Amino acid sequence: LAEKVAQEVLGKTLKPRMANYLPFKDQDGTVLDQGIALFFKAPNSFTGEDVLELQGHGGQIILDLLLQRILKIEGIRIARAGEFSEQAFLNDKLDLAQAEAIADLIDATSEQAARSALKSLQGEFSNKVNELVDSVIYLRTYVEAAIDFPDEEIDFLADGKIEAKLNEIIAQLDGVRKEAKQGSILREGMKVVIAGKPNAGKSSLLNALAGREAAIVTDIAGTTRDVLREHIHIDGMPLHIIDTAGLREASDEVEKIGIQRAWDEIGQADHVLLMIDSTLSAADQFQQEWADFLAKLPVKMPVTVIRNKVDLSGE
């Protein structure tokens, strides 16, 4: 079909991978635009199929006229969203991670997200996954050899190589998981939960970060009873800031629900900001609050402690 379009719109057959400056013509021979035409013969193209690339002048009207002209050719239709990447994947031009990276690159909302997506598109993440797979296959051959040839004098398990290789694979897997997690944060934004006891200043911090009065702030403990969310950017990093109900033993049923929701958000957070009221927490009290809070957190949850109201504490 690419060659058919070239014949009808350009009036000539193009040599593969050679730029041609030509008029783009309508059915009656009227020139719609003129620009550069490039033909890529399968499998030497992005999709692995025959591809015709037309580079015309900017402008929606010119683009619409050219599309209307091409769509009149039998067998031509508008591509579905992502169809070119899909064909590239099906024709082994891209792996799945690279195909997804194209969408991530297009949808990137920060420089860091764009750079991360570009690295994945260039195959960096896929290479690390393939290296991990190769390491597992290498380890499996040793283990299977030890099982299949038990009478051999060489003991594959005694020299510590298997254990060392297994530890190396675990480290590789941990690195891949961290990189995948970082890519997800750059793409979707980091979820930051503000937690602490009632009236510690959580809502004031949310308002300061949001740059507006997103949450009601009073001197009454337990003012915030539900989850409040704000989406901001800091140095290009998208952040989902979440204010939660104060953590305490409550008798009020509505407040209990709010506190449970707070713990649910904390459990799903990428980072927790723990607010401590310096006017109420002496050193020993702070240590106890900190220990109690950590005991309820998921393993390896990043936490930043913020001591609020220091100016009122007399320190």
Image (tube, grey):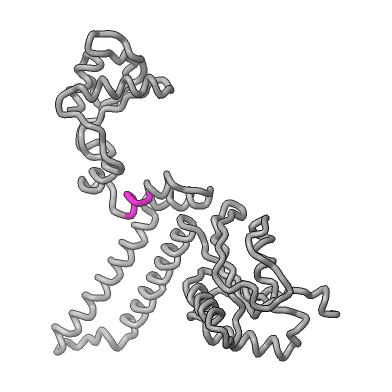
Residue 18 found in image quarter: top left
* 101 displayed left or right of 67: right
Residue 102 horizontal/vertical position (percent): 37, 46
Question: Is residue 250 a member of the stretch shown in magenta?
Answer: no
Residue 98 is one of the magenta-drawn residues: yes
Looking at this rendering, what residue extends furthest in the top direction?
A: 29
The residue sitting at 18% across, 79% down in the picture is: 144
Q: Position of residue 263 (x, y in %)?
A: 51, 78
User: Measured from the top left, where is residue 87 in percent x and y?
Assistant: 23, 43
Q: Is residue 139 above or below residue 211?
A: below
- Of the pair 220 and 120, the residue shown nearer to us: 220
- Residue lying at 71% horizontally and 76% vertically, measured from the top left: 220
* Horizontal side of residue 277 vs 163, given as left or right: right
Quadrant (top left/top right/bottom left/bottom right) for the C terminus:
bottom right
Numbered range of the magenta stretch: 97-101
Left or right, 91 with respect to 314, comes to left
Looking at the rendering, in which quadrant would you find the N terminus? top left
Residue 80 x %, y %:
26, 40
